[in-house]
Image: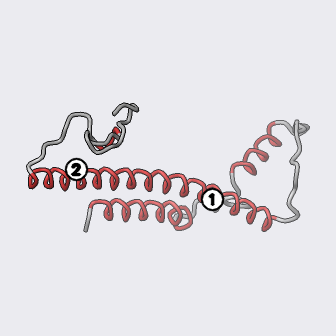
Amino acid sequence: MSRNTKINLLLLAIVAALAVLPLALGLGDHKDEPFTGADGEAETAITELEPDYEPWFSPLYEPPSGEIESALFSLQAALGAGVLAYYFGLRRGRRQGEQRALERERETGREETGTERETGREREPGTERETGSVPAGTGGTSADGQD
């Protein structure tokens, strides 16, 4: 089993433990609504400390039920995960593309070197592929516009 596979399995086990342990250990059993979230806990604490407190702002949209609120939260989480996955996938794809391009350049450089050795020709200075110049005497112009 590779090192990456072991790390992925360990992370998966940790995430599963974080999801299952609070339920298995009965955390939150002493409350009327266990696992309500930080917003509900904060509202309860504020009303206990200051009963006549009035919020400064009200929500722009109040979902008609808790199920719709949960669905919207799930949609928001899924969109965020999608954006992050796209970003990391794009970065990885670019990195792999750069590595493949470098490998192709190295292979092409080896093939050219082998051909030059077979024909007995040596590469003239300034005729590398990266500069876009053409070997002298072929009728082309070099990258700087001179023959």
Label disc, if present, on residue 28 of the rendered structure: 1
Q: Quadrant of the C terminus?
A: top left
Where 123 falls versus 118 (above or below)? above
Name the spot of residue 109 as percent of width and height, x first. Answer: 22, 50
Which residue appears at 88% of the width and 39% of the height? 57
- The answer to whether the residues at label 1 and label 2 have Cβ atoms under 8 Å apart is no
Name the spot of residue 54 as percent of width and height, x first. Answer: 90, 38
Which residue appears at 83% of the width and 42% of the height? 47
Q: Write down the quadrant of residue 42 in the picture.
A: top right
- In-image side of 52 versus 79 (left or right): right
Q: Write down the quadrant of residue 143 in the picture.
A: top left
Q: Quadrant of the N terminus?
A: bottom left
Residue assigned mark 2:
109
Q: Describe the element under mark 1 as helix, strand or loop.
A: loop
Which residue appears at 35% of the width and 42% of the height? 140
Q: Nearer the viewer, residue 119 or 132?
A: 119
Say which of marks 1 and 2 sits in front. Answer: 2
- In-image side of 91 versus 138 (left or right): right
User: Could you tell me the amino acid type at mark 2?
Assistant: Gly
Name the spot of residue 67 as percent of width and height, x first. Answer: 78, 68
How far apart are the alpha carbons under marks 1 and 2? 66 Å
- In-image side of 113 versus 45 (left or right): left
* Colour theme: secondary structure
Label disc, if present, on residue 104 of the rendered structure: none
- Mark 2: give few (<14), some (14-19) or many (20+) Cα within 10 Å: some
- Mark 1: give few (<14), some (14-19) or many (20+) Cα within 10 Å: few
Where 65 falls versus 49 (above or below)? below
Q: Describe the element under mark 2 as helix, strand or loop.
A: helix
- In-image side of 12 versus 27 (left or right): left
User: Could you tell me the amino acid type at mark 1?
Assistant: Gly
Would you say residue 42 is visible in this rendering? yes
